[in-house]
Image (spheres, coloured by chain):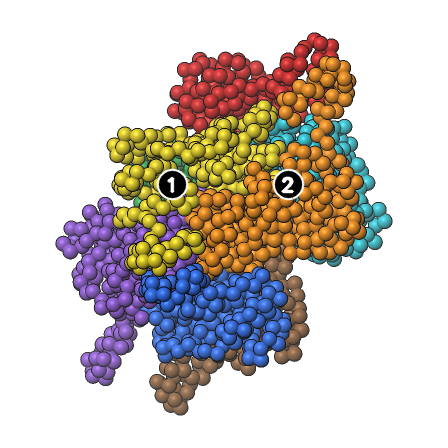
Chain colours: A purple, B blue, C orange, D yellow, E green, F brown, G cyan, H red
Amino acid sequence: MTNEEISRILESVKNQEINTNEALSLLKDFSFQELEYAKIDHHRELRTGYPEIIYCSGKTTEQVKGIISAMLEKDVDIMATRASEALFEAVKELHPELIYFNKARIISLRKRKPVFPDTSICIMTAGTSDIPVAEEAAVTAELLGNKTERIFDVGVAGIHRLMNKLDIIKKSRVVIVVAGMEGALASIIGGLIDKPIIAVPTSVGYGANFGGVSALLAMLTSCAGGVSVVNIDNGFGAGYYASMINKL
Amino acid sequence: MTNEEISRILESVKNQEINTNEALSLLKDFSFQELEYAKIDHHRELRTGYPEIIYCSGKTTEQVKGIISAMLEKDVDIMATRASEALFEAVKELHPELIYFNKARIISLRKRKPVFPDTSICIMTAGTSDIPVAEEAAVTAELLGNKTERIFDVGVAGIHRLMNKLDIIKKSRVVIVVAGMEGALASIIGGLIDKPIIAVPTSVGYGANFGGVSALLAMLTSCAGGVSVVNIDNGFGAGYYASMINKL
Amino acid sequence: MTNEEISRILESVKNQEINTNEALSLLKDFSFQELEYAKIDHHRELRTGYPEIIYCSGKTTEQVKGIISAMLEKDVDIMATRASEALFEAVKELHPELIYFNKARIISLRKRKPVFPDTSICIMTAGTSDIPVAEEAAVTAELLGNKTERIFDVGVAGIHRLMNKLDIIKKSRVVIVVAGMEGALASIIGGLIDKPIIAVPTSVGYGANFGGVSALLAMLTSCAGGVSVVNIDNGFGAGYYASMINKL
Amino acid sequence: MTNEEISRILESVKNQEINTNEALSLLKDFSFQELEYAKIDHHRELRTGYPEIIYCSGKTTEQVKGIISAMLEKDVDIMATRASEALFEAVKELHPELIYFNKARIISLRKRKPVFPDTSICIMTAGTSDIPVAEEAAVTAELLGNKTERIFDVGVAGIHRLMNKLDIIKKSRVVIVVAGMEGALASIIGGLIDKPIIAVPTSVGYGANFGGVSALLAMLTSCAGGVSVVNIDNGFGAGYYASMINKL
Amino acid sequence: MTNEEISRILESVKNQEINTNEALSLLKDFSFQELEYAKIDHHRELRTGYPEIIYCSGKTTEQVKGIISAMLEKDVDIMATRASEALFEAVKELHPELIYFNKARIISLRKRKPVFPDTSICIMTAGTSDIPVAEEAAVTAELLGNKTERIFDVGVAGIHRLMNKLDIIKKSRVVIVVAGMEGALASIIGGLIDKPIIAVPTSVGYGANFGGVSALLAMLTSCAGGVSVVNIDNGFGAGYYASMINKL
Amino acid sequence: MTNEEISRILESVKNQEINTNEALSLLKDFSFQELEYAKIDHHRELRTGYPEIIYCSGKTTEQVKGIISAMLEKDVDIMATRASEALFEAVKELHPELIYFNKARIISLRKRKPVFPDTSICIMTAGTSDIPVAEEAAVTAELLGNKTERIFDVGVAGIHRLMNKLDIIKKSRVVIVVAGMEGALASIIGGLIDKPIIAVPTSVGYGANFGGVSALLAMLTSCAGGVSVVNIDNGFGAGYYASMINKL
Amino acid sequence: MTNEEISRILESVKNQEINTNEALSLLKDFSFQELEYAKIDHHRELRTGYPEIIYCSGKTTEQVKGIISAMLEKDVDIMATRASEALFEAVKELHPELIYFNKARIISLRKRKPVFPDTSICIMTAGTSDIPVAEEAAVTAELLGNKTERIFDVGVAGIHRLMNKLDIIKKSRVVIVVAGMEGALASIIGGLIDKPIIAVPTSVGYGANFGGVSALLAMLTSCAGGVSVVNIDNGFGAGYYASMINKL
Amino acid sequence: MTNEEISRILESVKNQEINTNEALSLLKDFSFQELEYAKIDHHRELRTGYPEIIYCSGKTTEQVKGIISAMLEKDVDIMATRASEALFEAVKELHPELIYFNKARIISLRKRKPVFPDTSICIMTAGTSDIPVAEEAAVTAELLGNKTERIFDVGVAGIHRLMNKLDIIKKSRVVIVVAGMEGALASIIGGLIDKPIIAVPTSVGYGANFGGVSALLAMLTSCAGGVSVVNIDNGFGAGYYASMINKL
């Protein structure tokens, strides 16, 4: 939408050729804010139901600070993922309510908590080493307004630990399974429950794990139905997707 | 088996309503039927809400016939995927109500149609060649009791064809995006709507497509939120997963 | 050749029981028979406890016939793997006792049945399509003198089918797990029993299965102890290895 | 849990020796201990014959300390693999009998030494750089109660070094072959002896070695029978598997 | 060397304007300067229209200094890519006019600015993290005498940001699209405009991105026409190629 | 939508046969035609300067016939790539002017030949086996209105064959290099001329060629500037891209 | 073309023994013959000491016939590799002396047999299935004038078969080792002899062999010195290279 | 050990010149020296014509020192590759004549210089960054007694730099081509000369170079004859192999 088009719409409003509702609709508003290095999508919450979320990895500290500053001026909620503790130290001066989830590596400032149904999202891990990815998923889901259940370290090498938690798992509306190595936990859960499972392969492992590829392939080829997959270590994506489903 | 079920069986033992042998049988026997080459999971519908589904690829005609015959005796619904037309010719004599969806390559006999909410599942393809996979997804979803919308051949090379259908897409409860080549359609839809998207990479393409790997990787690394992925060409998995979400 | 054998030969030379040419021949000649296209290792049974086994894939019918003919002359047992039915038709005229296991694709003529302990080898498959590889393993183990138990189609998508067979599995001395797709069955069994497991990935599956690579990687990175792996579809290797362990 | 165990519990209920709540607890509770980040499987030794073993890689120092502390309270044996020297420094205060094998990177506290047969496990390496992986295998086997033989640096580039040790190798009950680069040593040994060989590819090498993939593939495709494979650098897995076989 | 040039030299020999030694030197000597570790191609500008450009990665500081010194003596323009700030600190003493573009990591000394047509090259990025690669492309194009337009952070997750810039994009003569993750931006632009697009995959991303491979494959298999691809992170190559096209 | 159609709409507005809203609607509606299995993009020529082109691979004969029939009704030019001879036999009845280029596997019906500058596109191959891909590129370029030069079988194994053609190559405006195996020809040409080169890796070769991957990687990592790459065997893409550049 | 040759031509010009046009022709014309689809390099024998060799794979029968016909006119020797029996049937009418080596798949017509030293090339295979590749190598070497020794089926699974042939191997000047599966034979030979070894990986095998990649990687990472590698199944390349070395 | 040697030992036994124990020792003992972590192959020089060479990568400083000390006692020549400067600082105290080649990263002590023919080995690189690998090759060849010619930085981007050196190249007996990126230099040289070429791919490059894989594949699939390949960055292997050929 060019400046001229916007001007013309505004003139039409002024001349009462169209009313403000119509104008609003016309502007249907590709509003975004332009920094030198980023275009902040303030319109995103309206369009997709979720605020713009900052992926910190690969951005300089100055860039993250600039983006957060610009968002603070607009009074929108803030969520920044893959944030190191050092990064948080650098940005926390921008606003007193900025908080840091260190296991999940997420910076957040959340004023409007969306009202979600009372159902919960269950986040499971196969091992202890998978917890950071699971925490990214869980905190993401919580910040987006969901209840969560954490069940960690219930991998298939000791399957009775899992069976013991089956009631909690079955009561959840959607289940996130976080697993590295051979990722078999996703298939097990898929054979036991009738809820959608979001499988998150992790880079936990070594050798023929290839940085998470083994778990990724295993989850994609799972013989159990009801399993879909997100990128390796993508806790955020899983939490976001689970929230979408939980909100339906 | 939940705690309550176990408790109930134990109470029956205590009250001498059933003897220990009967209890043993109840506790151990998740019912299934044993053929020489297969164990048919009649319990599956109870456990996961969906009937046992026969994946025909890699099974001999005799094996598929045997499994269907055994299931017909139990009067359960039948759904067999990756079935060639020749296979259907061989099995259709088993029951007059067996039907064949040739684009989707599915054999079906469905008596009990589950009652689902009135929301629909949208199945999109980037190109014409992706249609067989999309049909597998659509017919699966329909046999499981869902309404569907098909929007085919709206790939990014002519993005206006997609924009034209945006209203239908936005009205769906969950969207399946089927695409080969570079699979960019999933990212586009992910940036435009706020519903969960199930991305199905297809093996359509050549050269650096590597049998669907390019689309698979692109979908897994999508910069848009709200996208999860199933195996290459796995139309069935996508339809099944969408049905799960739609049923929530 | 052990030190003792060499010493004995040398003593014979010193004692002039044999001349140096004969000694040379003894020292150099590990006996084998030379055809134009193959060197048949008659010494193998002595050296490794198992007869020379013919891997038919990649050999012409004439070559297989030639090798079998040469072995028949030496009166050794015969075992030929990856043999098509057509190949068997071509070679069965060589000897009336040659038999064919069509599911396992093995041609055999076995006179001396080795005496093994009374323990058995359990061969499991995740699905029906994995059966040909499992049969290759089972028939191999049987021809080498072992008792076997077959448990087919107990994949993780219906884990109760597996639990039902746990007693049989636990009684075996060594377990072969044959699985395609994500190969999770090996990890499950590994977490439940304390016997060595030989995992055989199969090429059953499609898409991100990559001809068995997904199952292979999953089995190699299994978080359960007690799992070792052989090549994709290598039923023979698994049966042979299990026999070695069972014979200890 | 076997049929007999379930029957016995059910009989106790019927005889009112225990009430249904107690039975429920017995039936459901495969005992494990729950920390915030881990579920310690005390039942494991009973179930699989081996104690729970801590894989330190990817766990924080605090997590490893917490798990060891919890295990010390239960008076079970302790074995922690992939432990750096720094980690040992941090945990050794927990108990005076904790010891550290620095070449094998294993922390251990072992009270009950299992009684194994008098046969030994032979651990071989192709080169000097493969020794750390071999030590992990050897120490694991020893802690699990086995006798071992170490034969290092006998790779195929100087095959006479290997021939010289053949007597020792042939006397072992099971052989672990640790090799990087092209991993040919496993095939050589496989052609010379009739004992099960556990091949461990290592990441030793460079270029087309791809972090151990070349050795892994070579071992999987070995033309010698009697070779099974574990993950790259997985000395622990090899030692554990060899112990299982030696114990049969 | 064209036929005409050879003919002219031969004519000079025949006319005895030059002797055979001189002719030999002319025929053989495509002029270059020989250092111990490099052969500087002063002839390159004549032959391909562009000066020799120094790729600093993998060269020692001393080598880069030596090459720049040698070129300064010949009074040719200098352009050195993949130069760290530390490298610039080390070489800037060689000439007062050497300047450093720190976002693009390029050292330059440019006296002769080639005269290009008035058309411009548009450089786009999908995200903020792609900017360093885009800057390398943009500065390269500018140093080679082209006008540029930068449009950053317009990835497909917020496609309206892109639509807003479509006029500028369409006015450019050639477009460089720099994108990591799934690289879908190249396909989108390819479907919207009729100018050649040079796609640069970046290593931005994680997990199944495999250091840029996902974006690379997606761009190669783009269903949109008019897209060609250069190496991952190869901003220089894209700027150079765009300049070639713009100069036609 | 052709220029003529747009003109006609504008005339209707001028003649007040339709009002501006109706005209806007006609113009805004990116006209495409909806078949059951395809959406034909008649507007494409306006938007990108090139007609919709049918990629036949993966489409059924009925689908291709349907699409061509629909396009014939609209009187637009037709170009269908990857068309087998059998496919042409099936569609040629649709229109007497449909012709088939059998080496290039292209079906065409071209009425309006676009007027291009008098410069030509040079298409080179390294070997004889690369010719089909080169023909696809050449015929595509010609159908789009370009002059072409073909130089086949000038690979680096006999580099003098190439040198002999250097004059023709240098006179072209843009060069397409088609090569399989190690694809070195693209680098050679890149070091010799100052025109943009479009490299097309082919699947010609065997073994470590991996279906064209070796040539693809070599072309992407070419040390010569001025080389961009399209998908393996993508002769059409190269011809289309070259045409875009030639038209600038 | 050496300096001396150029000088001589220039002198001839100066002395007016030849005119400039003739000189141009001499300088530019490395003689080759141009067909529509191929440029036959008659100059090759002069330049590299070996005749132009036709690689038939990927060429049509008509193209091979055309090339052979053109070469027959020039009276040069002919060697065509990867030729099917059907192809030979089609071309043998061109000349009565054309012969076919069916195991090696080579068509040949050789008049001038080069005189080589009396040393021989040893060609070994690990298995029977590797023989076709070995025959391609052996026949190539023989046609180029070398003596050969064939030692087939001496793989590492029965290493004594190899030891028995060590004298013959050690007497050869250069050794070609052809092996599929894990390719360990090359390393073994490399540790036993001090002659250059040319390793040829073959595509013999299955599963994790990946069409010869396992053998290729093993040979490249061989811990034995004195091993170089050619492409998978490239018997011709190995024979040609061995001939080069033998001729030195 | 040849037949003759065995015969001679046997004759000595028969003639009672040596007793059976001595004979046993001679027959079994291919002499090597056993350290805790290494078996030094003093017999190697006799067997393969080259001394044992220490590959330092992956060995601790103490291990390298121990091996060198043991070799110094035996008065054999020493050559240690992949040695860092720090390693040399640690070992140089062992003997005053130990020297360090820092570009080649080789430690050496060479007393007996083998007498080789007067022919030389030519080592070429495509770029400046390839020099360390080339130096490893060159110094290796020199230490083994060969004359060398170094021609660096003559990659295909400026092919005239190469042509200028063609005379030197053609006079060498064997040529080592060291190249990263697309590795095209090997093919070029292969088309120009008739001497064996040893191609060494290097890890120089980025992105789709994949640590040298692109160059490796390109060299393996070279369309030029006379090219064999060693491992990525394996300068030592190339120098050793070239020396073997030069010595023939």
Figure quadrant of residue G19: top right
Give left or right: position of A16 versus F22: left
| The C terminus of chain C - image quarter | top right
Find the residue positioned furthest to the top.
H17
Q: Position of residue B130 (x, y in %)?
A: 51, 68
Give left or right: position of E210 versus C113: left
Say the numbered circle drawn on residue D51.
1
Tell me the chain of label 2: C
Q: Position of residue C91 (x, y in %)?
A: 77, 51
Residue shown at 53%/44% (left/top)? C173
Residue shown at 54%/31% (left/top)? D172
Find the residue positioned furthest to the front.
D15
Residue situated in front as seen by the camera: D8 or C48: D8
Residue shown at 42%/42% (left/top)? D49
Q: Position of residue G46 (x, y in %)?
A: 71, 38
Tell me the chain of label 1: D
- Both on one chain, marks 2 and 1? no
Find the residue positioned furthest to the bottom.
F17
Residue situated in front as seen by the camera: A79 or H166: A79
Residue situated in front as seen by the camera: G72 or D68: D68
Q: Nearer the viewer, mark 2 or mark 1?
A: 2
Is residue D77 placed above or below F231 in the rendered structure?
above
Q: Residues within 10 Å of mark 1 (few under 14, many from 20)?
A: some
